[in-house]
Amino acid sequence: ADGARPSNEGRGYVLRRVLRRALRYGRQFLDAPDGFFHKLVAGVVVDEGKGFFPELEAKRDALREIVKEEEEAFAKLLDRGLKYFDDVRKTVQAEGRSEVSGEEAFYLYDTLGFPVDLTLIMANDVGLGLDGAGFEACMEEQKQRSRDALKQARAAGLGGGVSLSTDQVALLRNAGVAATDDDAKYALEDDAAAAAATTVAAVFTPESGDEGLEESVAVAEGDVVGVVLDATPFYAEAGGQVGDHGVITLDGGLEVEVQDVQNYGGYVLHVGVAAGAGAAARGAAAAPKVDYARRSLVAPNHTMTHVLNLALRDALGPDVDQKGSLCDAEKLRFDFSHGKALTAKQLAAVEAQVQDIIAAAMPVDTKVLPLADAQRIPGLRAVFGETYPDPVRVVSVGGNVAALAAEADDDVAAPALVSTEFCGGTHLRNSAEAEAFVIAEETAVAKGIRRIVGLTGEAARAAAAAGEELRAELAAAGRSADERLREVTERLERRLQQSLERAVTLEKELYRSEEARSASERSAAEAQLRLEAERAEAEASIRTKYARIYEGAATDLTAQKKSYEAFRRQKEVEAEEAAASLAQSREAHSQEVGEFQLQLHRAGTDMDDLRQRLRLKEADSLKAIADARQATAKAVSLEGRLKALNLDLEAEKRNALESLAETEQTFRREKVVWEQELDSMRARLHGATAELQQLKSMKLEADRRQMEHLARLQEHVTDEVQRLFKKEIEQIVKT
């Protein structure tokens, strides 16, 4: 609520570390769902604390969005980080180690966004320690890579870079070399003070070591050389402003074309290329000459950066903080904290306010004040976490620094259209000297960080003119294109209507075919049902007939068997009686035997009749089976006819689909013709945008300086992180 934002430096990094500790604890130990923390902050924290801090309630929504963005950003890495740490824990325990290595902690820090103090807490939770010395070694290696990248970037522009190491700066101090006097660096034009002769304090080359200062260095044409003067009018790169270019003429006529100027501990190093051969010696006279034409292009970009900062706060609110800047001869670039892209209306308002301040011809006043007095100026802007000298230089656009400082204790509100900042850069004397201003680009560079690229002076007018020409050409192209597009559209609509009508006709035919197919399917289904019914009826009839035949035959056979058994028993009785009376009459016995044989013959005849009846019943059954088979064959025939009908329907469907495909191809060919016409129109528009591409080429030279600035900024950030880490470790040790 006081304006801090989670970031990688200063209080923003402290805030980020606290938030990420809480997120890790909630996820790992409380099993909290995704998105729990921003709701907790915007709800419970604000409700409980708003009585003591009213700004919490006023900024509830902003707090919710800030914490939500940080929560969502870390959530993408949290699961990976926890899994990686769990794998590390298992490895450490398996190897019998007692602490997490510096390399493992640095991977969590550098790749997965886990602050080292969070990793230490996680290690302690599972009974492990952390190799702090190893982590510091990894951090130092990263800083060295940053320094090497900076040297390579400079070497790319100078054929081999020259920079001063800490040991070389110590050499200068131990040799009694005074810090460079650069009071003349603020002039916008050549004057006697800036052109005053000076002397060479030291000379360095890419091969210079830290054993001692060389009294004289032989230089060949094209060699890269670094010169430290006892006084200089050159501006060393600082505060987002690039260093000056120019020429230093040494005693003996050797000229060094300066292309880079850096400040190392108060010693200003001028790095350039020798325009001839000669010697550069300590104590030799030197005549520095700044390229003031180039500086006059840089100054308006720097001054308008201050004005842009003011306009952004007016348009977006007081929570907008500067996050970085770059001012060179081609453009100004300003990074600021804001959670989303600016709308067209906001961009127009910002641009209009800067243009209004230019049109108002406001004076630009500078004054060096004691730091304590300067910090009380109402409306003063300073980069949080930046270390400022005491005394400090104050720059005000539209205000008088002395008057503002005098009103500091009078509880006077800051003037509405006055920009007041700490700054050591070169500036205009009046805002009207910037002539013009346009915003060329607005984009995101990091989570919650936006970037605006602006142009001033002739570049702004050229960009505005190019924009107006493009608008005019687009309007003209749009009017002519509208007519052609209308014709093409009407033609396509007619053909599309015809295609649709044809499609409707085909759909109707297909519908009729589907109806016929459905009717055939219904007829086939009905025939199938009838066939099934007939088959079931035939099977039932056959079963009934067989059952009746079997029952009748079985009944007859049972009756015959019973009759035969009864007859046999009777005859046995009679035979026994006959045997008993055999002796009485053999003739009577023979007669009885004949009668018995006659009865047996009759029983056999009855059995033959029964067998004949069974054969007839079997023939009837076979006929019924044949009838059933004939019905089955008829059903199979009906199924064949149904399949043939299905094939005919499929053929009709394919024909309909082919007709539709042909219609679609015709439509696509017409679409290709239309697209070709549109491509022709785009080609004309491409020609109109060619001039805008020329503006982009202006960035190429600035990219090199941007890389240098980013590398230095990264080194500064790394140093700051290391300082904070050491301070945090010391606090932990004390605790």
Image (cartoon, rainbow, N blue to C red):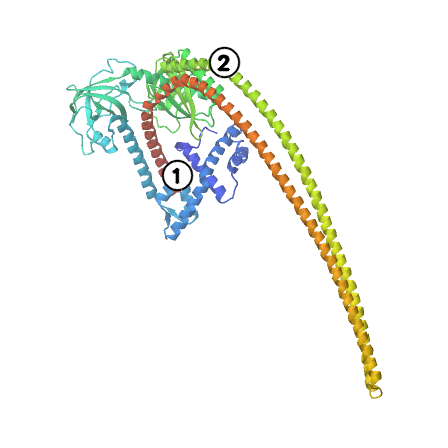
Disc 1 to disc 2, C-alpha distance: 53 Å
Which residue lies under the disc numbered 2?
A: 479
Q: Name the foreground residue: 190 vs 171.
A: 190
Give the numbered dot on residue 111: 1
- Left or right of 37 in this view: 630: right
Question: Residue at 83% across / 77% down in the picture?
Answer: 595
Residue 729: give x, y in percent of width and height.
37, 40
Q: Name the foreground residue: 288 vs 484.
A: 484
In this picture, is 185 found above or below 52? Answer: above
Q: Type of residue at label 2?
A: Arg
State the image quarter where residue 393 is shown: top left
Query: Residue 187, can we see it?
Result: no
Label 2 Cα crowd, 10 Å radius (few <14 / some 14-19 / many 20+):
few
Q: Quadrant of the C terminus?
A: top left
Question: Residue at 83% across / 88% down in the picture?
Answer: 583
Q: Is mark 2 on a helix, strand or loop?
A: helix
Name the N-terminal-most of marks 1 and 2. Answer: 1
Q: Type of residue at label 1?
A: Thr
Q: Name the foreground residue: 720 vs 652.
A: 652
